[in-house]
Image: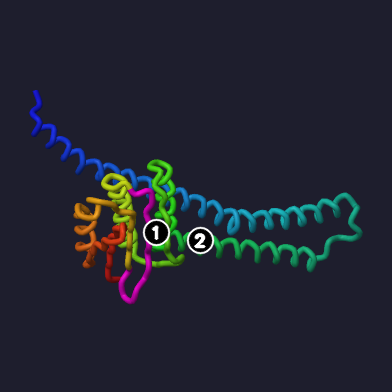
């Protein structure tokens, strides 16, 4: 039979293990969303840069074939001049060369390593929508578009936001949370705040967030007061 101390220990294990599982699911979803967006982008690029020029090439070839067929049928007066056919073929060659150039540029772009830091804000927004749907806690986001940071930092900031919102859900009764992200000087500042009441302000200790920020050379400060609790994370760029 379990002793009361055993149950307490198991509850502590679950309390530490659940955020790990939750973060793994979040990272997996983030990766899946990023892959979906990349597939859509590739599809659009293929349509605009590859399929469209080849449609033009097909139409050009059809026009040359039509000119030859009309001449054979006698519906086209005289034999198509050499200059006429040459002009048509030159246009087709130019179109083909452009298509080859676009393909080379496209393949070169795929082979280059591109930063996904700009996807941080859309990822936070998507996660916040899912978080609000699952918990009923409203999440407001204040972040300027076009923040470009490294992939690693973007991933860590996303994890910090996810952990902070998870803490709001598990350790407070707040009906709302705010996520603020801004570049200030040579650092990026992330603030996750929520309504706090009673013991919430006294027991709040985001150890996991502090460990992540410290590993990035940053710091974490807790701002409590006026019924509000905020985790302020500053990380140098």
For disc 2, the marked residue is 106
Q: Position of residue 20 (x, y in %)?
A: 24, 45
Image coordinates of residue 22 in percent, x first then y, are 30, 43
Q: For the residue labelled by badge 1, is the local secondary structure a helix, a strand or a loop?
A: helix
Segment tinted magenta in the rendering: 174-188
Q: Residue at x 32, y 51 (%)?
A: 165
Local SS, label 2: helix
Residue 120 placement: quadrant: bottom left
Quadrant housing the N terminus: top left
Q: Residue furthest bottom?
A: 185
The residue positioned 20% from the left and 63% from the top of the image is: 214
Who is closer to the viewer here, 223 or 236? 223
Quarter of the image with the C terminus in it? bottom left
For the question of whether residue 113 can be seen, the reply is: no
Residue toward you, 36 or 97 = 36
Read off the residue under disc 1.
120
x, y percent for residue 114: 40, 63
Q: Main secondary structure of the magenta part?
A: strand
């Amino acid at each position: 039979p379990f002793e009361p101390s055993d149950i307490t220990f198991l509850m502590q294990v679950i309390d530490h293990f659940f955020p790990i599982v939750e973060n793994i699911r979040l990272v997996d979803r983030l990766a899946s969303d990023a892959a979906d967006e990349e597939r859509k982008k590739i599809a659009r690029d293929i349509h605009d840069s590859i399929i469209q020029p080849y449609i033009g090439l097909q139409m050009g070839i059809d026009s040359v074939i039509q000119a030859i067929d009309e001449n054979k049928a006698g519906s086209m007066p005289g034999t198509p001049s050499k200059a006429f056919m040459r002009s048509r073929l030159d246009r087709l060659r130019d179109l083909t060369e452009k298509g080859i150039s676009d393909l080379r540029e496209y393949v070169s772009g795929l082979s280059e390593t591109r930063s996904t830091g700009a996807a941080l804000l859309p990822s936070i927004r998507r996660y916040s929508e899912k978080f609000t749907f699952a918990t009923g806690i409203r999440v407001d986001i204040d972040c300027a578009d076009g923040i470009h940071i490294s992939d690693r930092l973007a991933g860590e900031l996303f994890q910090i936001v996810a952990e902070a919102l998870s803490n709001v859900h598990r350790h407070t009764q707040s009906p709302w949370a705010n996520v603020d992200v801004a570049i200030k000087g040579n650092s990026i500042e992330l603030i996750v705040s929520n309504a706090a009441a009673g013991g919430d302000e006294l027991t709040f200790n985001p150890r996991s967030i502090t460990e992540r920020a410290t590993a990035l050379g940053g710091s974490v400060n807790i701002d409590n007061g006026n019924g509000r609790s905020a985790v302020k994370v500053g990380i140098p760029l």
